[in-house]
Amino acid sequence: MSGADYQPGDDEQQMPVDPQVEFLQQLIKDNEFLQRENLLLEAFLAKQDQSKLGIIVEEDSGKKKKGNKKGKIETKKEVFNKLTDDEKNDLVSQEIELVQAEIDQLKKAGEKDIDDIKTLMEEVDMRISETKKDTYEFKRDIIIGAENPRTGKIVGEKMIRFMEEKLRQKDTMIEKLRLKNTTTKAQIAKLEQQLAHKEEMGEVLHLVDFDQLTIENQQYMEKIEERNNELLRLKLSTSRTVQVLNNLKSQLGDLVAMGQHLRKMITERKAELAKFDNDLVSVGEEKTKADRTVRRLKAEQEDIDNPTIMDYIRLKHDVLELEKQATDWSRKIDILQMEKKRTTQMLKSIAAMTGAAGPAGQGPTASAFGSQSGKIK
């Protein structure tokens, strides 16, 4: 065969499988199987009683000390002997049973947790409904029913009575549940005492009796759990009620302090009102005196003959006319005085002229004087 015709795939198909490779693969499979067996045995040994294993180990060590060298070799060989298929089957069956028991236990624990969660949910629903009911009653009896229509504020006495009534109801419920719990505990103690007495007397309990007692015990345990849940719920409700009561007490203290302050202000306002009443009385007395004085003055005024308004207007008119006439006469007097001065000056000038002209000039002078006098008139 030439080099051009050579192909690697043809050699791989023609070459046989290596037996060492097959042996190695088989060893790997066997190791995996042994590892799974070891894990199973470790899990089995971990769940077995360690005291029994200790006894077996002590017996094996005693045998090793007593045996000779050959015995030791045989013991060593026995240690490494493989388990038979029956033993392996038993181990697997036991392991399956243990695993199944663990699964059942986990299921029971899960169911118990589910029951507990359902119980808590029911308790929460009950608390919510009770809270809504308490809120409705509080709004109906306190916020609306206890409101003072005059001041618009809540009456503290009604609030205290409401809270005392609620606390009284809670105390009554707690006492009832405590009595039921005590009765249930007494019944359980009685049954336990009877069971112990039967065990002492050597009486053998039949399977039916044992099942009946188990059922009764389960029922009593459920009742006890219900009572404990109810008691816990009441304790929580009581704590919430006490918290609300403390808050309301603090609010009541604030309202009491405010009431005292308002009482003090009312007392001060009453004192001021009394003072105002005294002032009003004194003002009324002064008003009475003033009224008397006014009446007296009016009486005195009515006795005097006072002029009427028309007389006053008439007199005012006459005064104005007289003042006007006086003004006219004063103007006339001023004019006459001016004429007098001018005439005097003219007379002086005429007299001077007359003295210079002589007696012949008396005629014109006299006529001029006569005309001036006429103007004056």
Image (cartoon, rainbow, N blue to C red):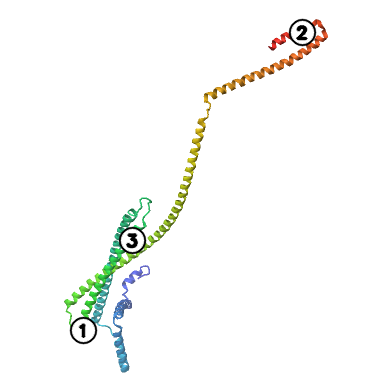
Residue tagged by mark 1?
200
Q: Who is closer to the viewer here, 194 or 33?
A: 194
Residue tagged by mark 3?
163
Sequence-earlier tag: 1 or 3: 3
Looking at the picture, does residue 7 appear above or below residue 77?
A: above
Q: Tag 1: residue type?
A: Glu
Residue at horizontal 21 percent and vertical 75 percent from the top: 214
Residue 168, horizontal then vertical, whole percent: 30, 64
Sequence-earlier tag: 1 or 2: 1
Q: Secondary structure at mark 1?
A: helix
Q: Tag 3: residue type?
A: Met
* Discs 3/2, front: 2
Residue tagged by mark 2?
365
Residue at horizontal 64 percent and vertical 18 percent from the top: 328
Residue 292, horizontal then vertical, whole percent: 49, 38
Residue at horizontal 68 percent and vertical 18 percent from the top: 333
Residue 229, horizontal then vertical, whole percent: 29, 68
As drawn, which residue projects farthest toward the front? Answer: 303
Sequence-earlier tag: 3 or 2: 3
Q: In the picture, which quadrant includes the C terminus?
A: top right
